[in-house]
Image: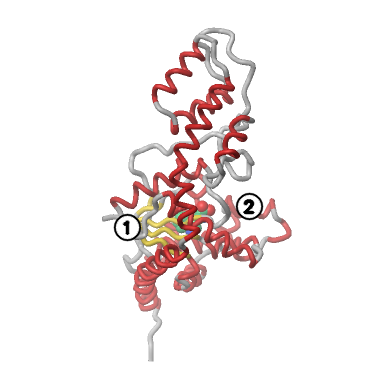
Amino acid sequence: MKTVVSGIRSTGNLHLGNYYGALKNFIRMQEQNRCFFFIADYHSLTTHPDPAILHPNVKRVLTEYLACGLNPEKSAIFIQSDVPEVIELYLMLNMHAYLGELTKTTSFKDKARKQPENVNAGLLTYPTLMAADILIHNADEVPVGKDQEQHLEMTRNFAKRFNNFYKVDYFKEPIAYSDGTKMIKIPGLDGSGKMGKSEGNCIYLADDPKTIEKKVKKALTDQGPTVQNSEKPECIQNLFTLMDVVSKPETIAFFEEQWNNCSIRYGDLKKQLAADIIEATNPIRERIAELDAHPEFLRKAVARGKEEAQESARKTIREVREIMGFKSF
Ligand code: TRP
C-alpha cells in the first residue's frame, strides 16, 4: 500500500472547484492508500493571520472536508500544529537547504513581489516545511496541482541530498500522485477558465440555495447563437461544463440541442443549472450543519488523526536523529 500525504490550505470556505477538483480525488485516494491529510496551519503563518481567525479558519476547512466525505476512519486527518515533530525535521532539512535554491523558487519570488513588506524567513523556507510534512511520513506520492510541482521537486532534492550526505537510503523520493483519472477543472461564473477564491467568481459549498440561484443568474452570457451548430464561446461553454458535473445527461442533451438549433434561453438554462447545483450540494450543506452542531465529532476525528500522524512522525524523528549523530546520555 502506498503512503500519500497532502496538506490543505487553512484559509476559508471551499468552493465547487475545490470539491470537484482536489477533494473528489482525495475521497477516491483514501480507499486504496494510507493517507495523511492535514490542515497546514503552520504554513498559514507566513501571512501573519489574526489570532482571532486562525482557529475558526482551520475549523471551517476541517468541517467542510469532513462534510464532503474525507473519512477519519480511513485516513489520518490532523492539524499540522498538533504534530509539532514536523518542526524538528524542518530545522534539520533547513541545514541542508541553500539560499540560492530557496530564493529561486517561483512561489517565493511571486510572494516577495506581491508582499514586499513581509518577505520573512518562513516564506523563504516554505518549501522545506512542505518537504518536512511529506518526508516525515515517508510518502510515496503527493497529490499536487501545477503550482506545487516545484515544491515536490525540491522535496525530492532534499531527500536525495540527505541520503547522499549521510550515506543512507532513508528517505524515499516522493512523486506526484496520479490514479489515471483527469482532474476536473471547474470554470468561473465570470466567463473565466477557473473558479478561484482570489478571482471572486465562486460558488461556495456553504452558500445557501438562494445565494446559489443569485450567483448563477448573474453568470456571464452572450447574445445567443445565431448560426446552427456553432461553437460555444467560453462563457457559455463554462455553463455547460458545470452542467457536466451536476446535471443529468438528459438535461445536458436537451440544452445542447437547443443551443444547436438556436432556440436556447439562457434564463431557463441558468434556472436548471442552479437547481442542479443546489441538489448536488444539498447533502454537503446538511452535513456541514450537522458537524457544526456536533463539535465532538471534529474533536474525535482530529484526536485520532493526531495519534496516527504522531506515531509515524516520532518514528521518523527518532531515526533521523540517529542518522545525524544525536545520542542520548
Ligand atoms: N503548499 C500546499 C498548498 O499551498 C499545502 C501543503 C503544505 C502541502 N504542506 C504540504 C501539500 C505537503 C502537499 C504536501 O496547497
Residue closest to the eye, 214 or 17: 214
Q: Is residue 299 above or below residue 177?
A: below
Q: Position of residue 15 (x, y in %)?
A: 53, 44
Mark carried by residue 181: none
- Residue at 58%, 32% in the rendered image: 216
The local secondary structure at tag 2 comes to helix
- At 45% from the left edge and 40% from the top edge, which residue is drawn? 20
Disc nearest the viewer among 1 and 2: 1
Sooner in the amino-acid sequence: mark 1 or mark 2 = 1
Left or right: 176 in relation to 110? left
280 vs 94, nearest the viewer: 280
**Residue lying furthest bottom:** 329
Percent coordinates x, y for residue 280 in the rendering: 44, 38
For residue 327, say whether it is visible.
yes
- Picture residue at 64% right of the left edge, 53% below the top: 111
Where is the N terminus found, in terms of image quarters?
bottom left
> Residue 154: in sight, yes or no?
no
Q: Position of residue 203 (x, y in %)?
A: 56, 40
Looking at the rendered structure, the kind of residue marked 1 is Lys
Is residue 111 depicted above or below 88 in this figure?
A: above
Question: Considering depth in this image, is 147 or 172 the residue closer to the camera?
Answer: 147
* Quadrant location, the C terminus: bottom left
Q: CA distance from mark 1 to mark 2?
A: 38 Å
Residue indicated by mark 2: 109
User: In the figure, residue 33 lies in which quadrant?
Assistant: bottom left
Image vertical order of residue 226 relative to residue 104, above or below? above
- In the picture of the structure, the residue carrying the numbered disc 1 is 74
User: Which amino acid, mark 2?
Assistant: Lys
